[in-house]
Image (spheres, rainbow, N blue to C red):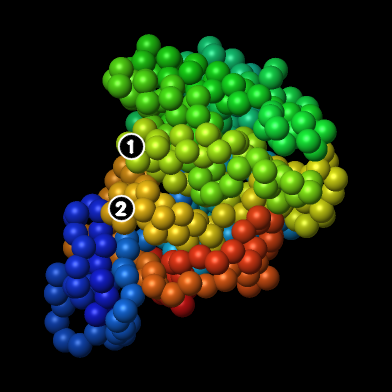
Amino acid sequence: MKMMIRNGRIVDPSLDFQGQKDLLIENGCFVDQFDGPPDRIIDAAGLTVFPGLIDAHCHLREPGQEYREDIVSGTRSAARGGFTTVACMANTIPVCDNAAVVRSIKDKAGREGYTRVLPVGAVSKGLKGKELAEIGLMAAEGIVAISDDGKPVESADLMRKAMLYASHFGLRVISHCEDLSLAEGGHMNEGYWSTILGLRSIPDISESIQVARECLLAEYLNLPVHIAHVSKRRSVEIIRQAKANGAPVTAETCPHYFTLTESACKGFNTQAKMNPPLGTESDVAAVISGLQDGTVDLIATDHAPHHADEKELEFGLANNGIVGFETALALGYTYLVKAGRLSLIDWLKTMTLNPARLLQPELGTLRAGRPADAVIVDLDHPFQFDRSTMLSKSRNTPFDGWELYGQVRWTICAGRVTYE
Ligand SMILES: [Zn+2]
């Protein structure tokens, strides 16, 4: 199978390249040339071609919660959003804390998925935070990191052991930072809006205290740690300082943390309920400044599908989280690039090159010889995001009806068209 993507404007941070260029694909990889005519030509005139996006943090819900999402629906939704690789968290049922679950996810994704799926294994057995999971056996099956995401690792000693043990397999820990003694029972960020709405709240330091702990552990052990879904000003400041001290810390944020504030909870809107909770305007400004100076390395979706029945409840009872695959590209492009906060190439790094470095360094590039992962996007014409058209099984998003730029026209994963 030979494919040509022609007339497109190419933007590739890994090659530091922006300009007109035709792309050639043969046998699933980019090539400099091939013999004979292409089997398929995609005309990208007026469109922009990026390396396929990489999501370092999502929840595909399989095994165990297929009424919310499964590997097929989740990766179809991801492909529609321009993703070609996604890393899925371990809080499935059963928990992905052993080799058999890792294998079953990889097998199903390999057979039926629309993106590459990189499983993240659990830090602790059953996500219980008591004893380490079978990290070595999971590493042999191809996990790309370990995380108890959804829950924090409460014990600093277990976190230390996890970082040490993971390092033997070239893996790092992805930390969901939350001090449960501060957060438990809270439903939104502590401040003006929690007072107005009369909701039990979570202080911002619930996140930042554990961010500080992970940064100290990384510095003390000189071992890497990756901080998931950074949402608060104090956390950004702590990570910035740790990086300046040379600690091997990386961090991600999510589109909702640079596009929404806690005021989105107005009217008890459960589509704005998430963990960590949406912050203040000063938190949003800090997250953006963290993306600008590289304190925050990458943007992940934290795609967290929930059934309508788990969201259309009173605020205190509704589940945390939103879907994110089908809005991440457009939210980033519209609110960071078009709004003049980041250059196109610096924003694109956060969704291609930087997550590739974290998870699978040969990906996230249009370089010849590498897997042919690309997304072809219309950056010029606005579109109205309509959640009823989503390919995810779940529709829990606060972005319904938003006017955005950056609509995906084609996604190509390993040389195969996965969305058009
Ligand atoms: Zn989390």
The residue positioned 65% from the left and 40% from the top of the image is 262
Left or right: 232 as drawn, with respect to 31: right
Identify which amino acid the numbered label 2 is placed on. Answer: Ser
x and y percent of residue 420 in the render? 46, 77
Q: Is residue 139 visible?
A: no
Q: Judging from the image, what secondary structure is the residue with disc 1 in?
A: loop
The residue positioned 70% from the left and 32% from the top of the image is 192
Q: Residue 294, which numbered label?
A: 1
Identify which amino acid the numbered label 1 is placed on. Answer: Gly
N-term mark: 1 or 2: 1
Q: Which residue is mark 2?
A: 343
- Residue 391 is drawn in which quadrant? bottom right
The residue positioned 43% from the left and 14% from the top of the image is 216
Pick whichever, 223 or 246, lies toward us: 246
The residue positioned 25% from the left and 59% from the top of the image is 12
> From what the image shows, is residue 33 above or below residue 149?
below
Q: Distance between the Cα atoms at labels 1 and 2? A: 13 Å
Pick whichever, 39 or 187, lies toward us: 187
x and y percent of residue 33 in the render? 14, 74
> From what the image shows, is residue 327 above or below residue 126?
below
Q: Residue 243, which numbered label?
A: none
x and y percent of residue 85 in the render? 43, 55
Left or right: 165 as drawn, with respect to 179: left
Q: Is residue 188 visible?
A: yes
Left or right: 266 as drawn, with respect to 141: right
